[in-house]
Amino acid sequence: MQQREIYQHQVSPQSYQTLLDEKAERLRQQFADYQPPALQVHPSKPQNFRLRAEFRLWHEADRCFFAMFEPGDKSKVYEVQDFPIASVLINNLMQRLLNSIQDNELLRRKLFQVEFLTTMSGDALITLIYHKRLEEEWQQEAIKLQAELGFPIVGRSKKQKLILERDWVNETLNVDGNQYHYRQIEGGFTQPNGDMNQQMLSWARAAADQITARTGDSDLLELYCGNGNFSVAMAEKFRRVLATEISKTSVNAAQINIADNQLDNLIIARLSSEEFVQALRGERTFTRLQDVDLTTYDFRTVLVDPPRAGLDDESVRQVQAYDNIIYISCNPDTLHANLAVLTETHDIEQFALFDQFPYTHHIETGVVLSRKTSV
Ligand SMILES: C[S@@+](CC[C@H](N)C(=O)[O-])C[C@H]1O[C@@H](n2cnc3c(N)ncnc32)[C@H](O)[C@@H]1O
């Protein structure tokens, strides 16, 4: 039988620091044309930082194992025995899951992908994805596996999603001595690096303090709010918060998060940013905003956390209408392009790197802008 090469992920504080220094330098150079203030670098933990992981399951003779491919070469398969960048809980569940399904024909046959979602507060969800229809016998075995592992399982196959207990996890984040509670639903966006997420939320809250010291009591507008990750942690800093998001799954989670955190000054509506911009300009009305009187809001600050594509032309012009902008970006190229417009009217006050994705080229950036006094 062919021996598979074992996947080795080199994680060490030294190699981590070298890569982070390179990233920070790359970011400084890319944005030098805007002459931003000194870059604040927020390092990640060098290992066990990822709360999500997904693996192919490879079947060979009478055994199966977690597998990864050589980037760009699907014919080269590595066996993954442990995954040091993932949370301790994911590593623990990987081993226990394999041991349990190895000799269980019903659970193992045609299982081709496994996804783990864990939280800082110790919850987990395991999704098993199959190339077969999931029948009653599978369900009986999966219920036993769920009891054995102590965490919920979701079974997926073409046009099938079987939730045995729940399809979400509970997260509690500790930020500035406060605890914020979040439901995170399978398939919805969540920040992958929990520790870095807490640092980002703390940074955004500190930015809000500086802004409100200038503006006094006013309201926050938020675009691309996901499950309310920022909205919940920012709510106490503003008189009222109005946030929007396109994904139904995330908005459903957000409504639960508003209730669980007992917030009465936060509203989250399901609208694309393009639609919301039309509503703000009075160009269109939406039944999803029928209980919201936009004219009563005093928005002086906007927070945006768009996908990799950044802000579209209309949204960037809308964002420019507010005195203070907190921009979280997962793509420096689109952030750089959007800043060409935003810096016509605003100055960059803060410039930060959050290392959400250690050992990769990906960079998460935070920028705070305020309106130029002369504009
Ligand atoms: C980088 S995530 C940020 C989510 C959230 N701020 C957080 O911290 O978890 C970007 C979010 O934008 C949403 N999104 C993508 N395109 C959108 C659009 N055109 N309008 C509104 N939301 C959109 C995605 O569903 C996703 O939840």
Image (tube, helix red, strand yellow):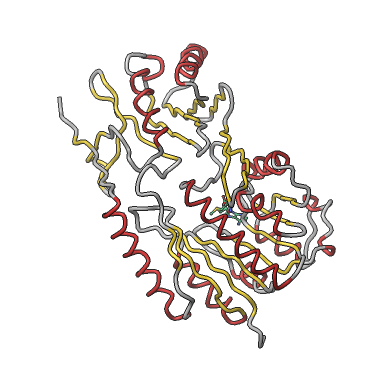
Q: Quadrant of residue 132?
A: top left
* Quarter in which the C terminus is drawn: bottom right
**Residue sitting at x 73%, y 71%:** 215
Q: Is residue 108 above or below residue 335?
A: above
Q: How many marks?
A: 0
Q: Is residue 159 above or below residue 11?
A: above
**Residue sitting at x 45%, y 40%:** 52
The front one of 363 and 352 is: 352
Can you give x and y, in whole percent of width and height, for residue 211 in the image? 66, 69
The front one of 244 and 52 is: 52
Can you give x and y, in whole percent of width and height, for residue 11 in the image? 28, 47
Can you give x and y, in whole percent of width and height, for residue 284 in the image? 78, 62
The front one of 11 and 137 is: 11
Q: Is residue 56 left or right of residue 342?
A: left
Q: Is residue 117 above or below residue 132?
A: below
Q: Quadrant of residue 5?
A: top left
Q: Residue furthest bottom?
A: 374
Q: Residue furthest front?
A: 177
* Quarter in which the N terminus is drawn: top left
Q: Is residue 19 left or right of residue 257?
A: left
Can you give x and y, in whole percent of width and height, for residue 119 in the image? 51, 38
